[in-house]
Amino acid sequence: MDITDKQIALHVPTLVGGGAERVMINLANEYAKRGLNVEMVLYRKEGEHLSELVPEVRCIGLEGKKAPVYSAMGSLVPLRGYLNERNPDIFLSGLTRANAVAILARATTNVDTRLIVTEHNHLASTVAGADLRRLQMLPIIARVTYPFADEILAVSNGVADSLANVSGLPRESIQTIYNPVVTDELRQKAQEPCDHPWLTSEDGPPVILGAGSLTPQKNFQMLIKAFEKVQQLTEAKLVIISEGELRDQLERQIDRLGLDDYVDLPGFVDNPYSYMNAADVFALSSKWEGLPTVLIEAMACGTPVVSTNCPSGPSEILQDGKYGPLVSVDDTDGFANALIDTLHSPPQKEKLQQRANDFSVEKVADEYLDLFFNR
């Protein structure tokens, strides 16, 4: 089937960051590289990743005539206008509230657009103990709206199971397509020099790397506790890149444990892949995930990984421990032991990279096209 005349629209709120945004950027750029007609539809044309879209991708903001769009429901009217004007063949949406509004927008137009929604979050974990009512409402939103989509996707089997359990949707109605993570750009950036002194020293101690927003979900408090135990048994250092609300709390913990000379929080970095490539072990300490992109990215760099066996994604990526140890969430001693074992006996780099290629943008883009056009 010739699909070069088909129009594909990809939809997320902004390109500020996160797994869903990265998926859409990678897919958009890959389809543009193949000569397909692809558009990125955003609430607002903003975000630090906006510049990563190749020029061939048309980027459309749903800004209102009088004010920018700042919420999912605020995008409903302009999204209806977009669908009526452009009538794309495929509309792929990511994130729960954006998905629901896309469904409502199509239902109130006369377009024949094929609508596919993707769930990126492990909803059971996201809403567990959530104080915000808007988070507690996510399963209800999915239950009411998702049946009106043409296809429902999840980024891992764990996310699909969770979506079915908390929303009541039939499990058989949810398909899984893994995220397109590994790109030529990732491979190229991984080879660039790293600018952190601990990761450029040839005779320094081994470095453990963590990456992700400094939030309760990522559980860096446990990683720092585990690292303290690692430090008692072997020489090492810990770097955690990114930024977030818990920075002050983590800095106080580091100071209290006397680890100021051994743990660094450099904040956001321009090229995290160079850090991953230079690190001796990558550590994922999360309490929950959907499909943790950073774990795949580290493996693509050939870096050994240690991960919590959190819901969901790590066990699927690491195939139940075949490609790296899985440790129970909050098992500080177990995590420390896994880090030490991996530092002393790392797996083969090529083995990790081969597994990471199962999440290449080329492979996953083909899987999406098969779904889009039933090829």
Image: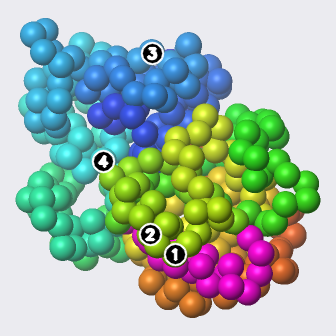
Residue type at numbered disc 2 = Gln
Q: Secondary structure at mark 3?
A: strand
| Mark 2 touches mark 1? (CB < 8 Å) | yes
Q: CA distance from mark 1 to mark 3?
A: 50 Å
**Residue receiving disc 3:** 58
First of labels 1, 3 by sequence position: 3
Across and down, in percent, residue 354 comes to 79, 60
Count neighbours of disc 2 (C-alpha within 10 A) and say few if under 14, some if 14 to 19, many if 20 or more: some
Residue sitting at x 40%, y 32%: 15
Q: Secondary structure at mark 1?
A: loop
Residue type at numbered disc 1 = Leu
Count neighbours of disc 4 (C-alpha within 10 A) and say few if under 14, some if 14 to 19, many if 20 or more: some
Q: Which residues are magenta?
A: 217-236
Q: CA distance from mark 4 to mark 1?
A: 38 Å
| Mark 4 touches mark 3? (CB < 8 Å) | no
First of labels 4, 1 by sequence position: 4
- Viewer-side residue, 355 vs 239: 239
First of labels 4, 3 by sequence position: 3
